Image (spheres, grey):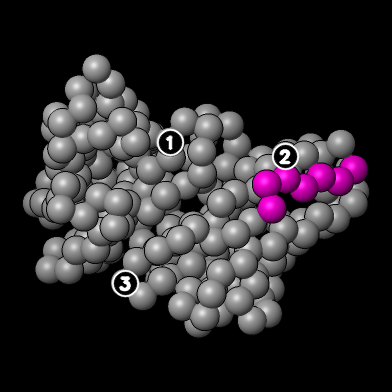
Amino acid sequence: QSALTQPPSASGSPGQSVTISCTGTSSDVGGSNYVSWYQQHPGKAPKLMIYEVSKRPSGVPDRFSGSKSGNTASLTVSGLQAADEADYYCSSHAGTKRVFGTGTKVTVL
Amino acid sequence: QVQLVESGGGVVQPGGSLRLSCAASGFTFSNFAIHWVRQAPGKGLEWVAAISSDGTNKYYADSVRGRFTVSRDDSSNSLFLQMNSLRAEDTAMYYCARDWGALFDYWGQGTLVTVSS
């Protein structure tokens, strides 16, 4: 099972928006509504930010939103803040397995 | 509150074995599937293995199948990962993560495994 494809980096100034893509196949992202996104700060464990493509867990700001079209899912962070600077990973079901994206480092300029 | 605490990491020679543990608390452990996810230094997340809530179904990444075995002991609220025939490429931080409806809602802080001679 190959990793889902994400851009290595993305950036934006405070207050701006950034969108990260996550491209898979019809066997994972395209065939599943169970796409989730995780935020990871250096030296920390990942934290769930979005699940089932577009749902936010309690406590996650509504500045974070998710969507999907075909084999590509997207995470948008609006109103960028310094605390949003982190690595972001998508994840999807792939049959009985799980697969993660390659990861995107978001930099707040 | 939900807690997952990994242990058992360390330095091991290529070809050696190691057994990781994940101690769970703050929830009914036997109701949840649990996963192992690893992250090589400076690299991305890689799903490793999973075990169903009743322990009957086990799933593995191709990269570890036949070498790693996942198990659980609900009496002690513990998850295990037996790792055999270790390779340099198995060097990583190993996290356990709770499965809640096709997502990982809680993660441990990880335990570091280094395979080196």
Q: Nearer the viewer, residue A12 or B73?
A: A12
Which residues, given as a range, are shown in magenta?
A7-13
**Mark 1: secondary structure:** loop
Question: Disc 1 residue type?
Answer: Ala
Q: Chain of mark 2?
A: A
Q: Chain of mark 3?
A: A
Please tell me how many numbered marks the rendered image carries: 3
Question: Disc 2 residue type?
Answer: Glu
Q: Is residue A54 left or right of residue B88?
A: right
Q: Is residue A54 magenta?
A: no
User: Residue at left 14%, top 39%?
Assistant: B84
Q: Position of residue B101 (x, y in %)?
A: 40, 71
Q: Is residue A101 left or right of residue B82?
A: right
User: Residue at left 81%, top 39%?
Assistant: A108
User: Residue at left 25%, top 42%?
Assistant: B22
Q: Is residue A1 above or below residue B67?
A: below
Q: Is residue B13 above or below residue A50?
A: above
**Mark 3: secondary structure:** loop
Give the residue at mark 1.
Answer: B40
